Image (tube, rainbow, N blue to C red):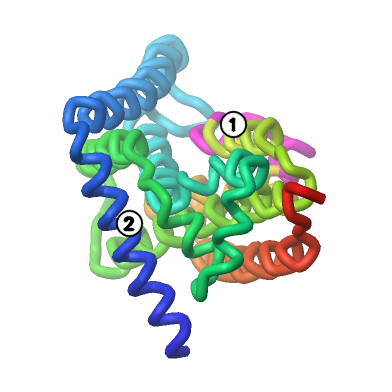
């Protein structure tokens, strides 16, 4: 346990150093945040246009889909802000920098995560929180202490689910060198399918997005609970699933690390 707290403390220090480094280029930081916000804003603008043509999608109105979109986007941002540096893992491995991580008395994963901070993802977070706040007021939600607590825990759970898949796929780069295309594919599935009610896909696709690649657990199931569209014990599993998947992803990381070979081999 002491080693865990030590790793967390050093990770925070590394991220603070990375943030200070990024803020040396303030205009670049602002542009990065704005680009993230604009990118996600255009994604929701497309939904807005669609909803003006079709006022309801599988029984969901614009405010409800906006809440779903904001919930997914907030979870996505919280997952990617601390983990974005893992996206560089193929270059870290190819350039031999990962070998240096192994020589230092600190978990290599913590070192990799601490190399930089996801700046553009703060733009994602800004748009996500804004949509949650606005849609939460317009979707006729009967807010109470339980719903607020569930919404908060569900966001953390959704972030952990995305983080788990991202970590697991990045881990494969320790043996396969480059898994970038696979990571982009999975991220697109979470982003594009996770922003809509699962009912519109129906049948096999809905089942696959719930029980194989658990996109539904990131935002759709929690949003359905908050909006009063779903009342099942399955909904309570959404936040817990993230914890289980992160633990499994870390085991995959450790397994791949055991099989890592230096770039010179």
Cα separation, mark 2 vs mark 1, equals 27 Å
Q: Is residue 118 left or right of residue 91?
A: left
Of the image marks 2 and 1, the number of the one nearer the N terminus: 2
**Would you place residue 179 above or below residue 154 in this image?**
above
- In the picture, residue 254 is in which quadrant? bottom right
Toward the front, the furthest residue is 264
Residue drawn at point x = 26 percent, y = 54 percent: 142
Label of residue 127 in the image: none
Q: Does 203 appear above or below 169?
A: above
Q: In this view, does 208 lie to the left or right of 120?
A: right
Foreground mark, 2 or 1, reads 2
User: Number of marks in the image?
Assistant: 2
Q: Which residue is drawn at 65% across and 62% down?
A: 249
Place of residue 197 in the rendered image (x, y in percent of width and height, measured from the top left):
54, 36
Give the residue at mark 1. Answer: 188
Task: Find numbered disc 1 in the image and state the secondary structure of the residue it sits on.
Answer: helix
At 41% from the left and 18% from the top, the residue drawn is 51
Magenta run includes residue 204: yes
Q: What stretch is highlighted in magenta?
A: 192-208
Q: How crowded is mark 1: few (under 14 residues within 10 Å), some or many (20 or more)?
A: few
Q: In the image as oriented, which residue stretches furthest toward the bottom?
A: 2
Instruction: Identify the secondary structure beneath mark 2.
Output: helix
């Amino acid at each position: 346990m002491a080693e865990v707290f030590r790793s967390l403390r050093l990770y925070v220090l590394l991220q603070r150093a990375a943030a200070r480094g990024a803020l040396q280029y303030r205009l670049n930081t602002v542009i990065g945040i704005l680009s993230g916000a604009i990118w996600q804003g255009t994604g929701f603008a497309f939904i807005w246009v669609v909803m003006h043509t079709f006022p309801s999608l599988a029984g969901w109105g614009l405010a409800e889909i906006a809440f779903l979109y904001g919930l997914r986007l907030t979870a996505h941002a919280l997952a990617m802000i601390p983990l974005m540096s893992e996206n560089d893992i193929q270059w870290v491995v190819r350039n031999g920098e990962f070998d240096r991580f192994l020589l230092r008395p600190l978990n290599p994963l913590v070192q990799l995560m601490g190399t930089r901070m996801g700046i553009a993802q703060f733009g994602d977070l800004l748009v996500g929180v804004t949509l949650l706040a606005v849609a939460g007021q317009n979707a006729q939600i009967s807010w109470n202490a339980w719903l607020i607590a569930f919404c908060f825990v569900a966001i953390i759970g959704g972030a952990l689910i995305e983080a788990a898949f991202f970590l697991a796929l990045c881990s494969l780069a320790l043996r396969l060198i480059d898994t970038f295309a696979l990571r982009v594919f999975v991220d697109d599935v979470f982003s594009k399918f996770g922003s809509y009610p699962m009912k519109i896909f129906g049948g096999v696709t809905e089942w696959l997005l719930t029980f194989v690649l658990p996109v539904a657990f990131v935002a759709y199931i929690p949003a359905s609970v908050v909006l009063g569209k779903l009342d099942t014990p399955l909904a309570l599993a959404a936040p817990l699933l993230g914890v289980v998947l992160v633990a499994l992803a870390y085991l995959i990381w450790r397994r791949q690390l055991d099989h890592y070979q230096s770039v010179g081999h």
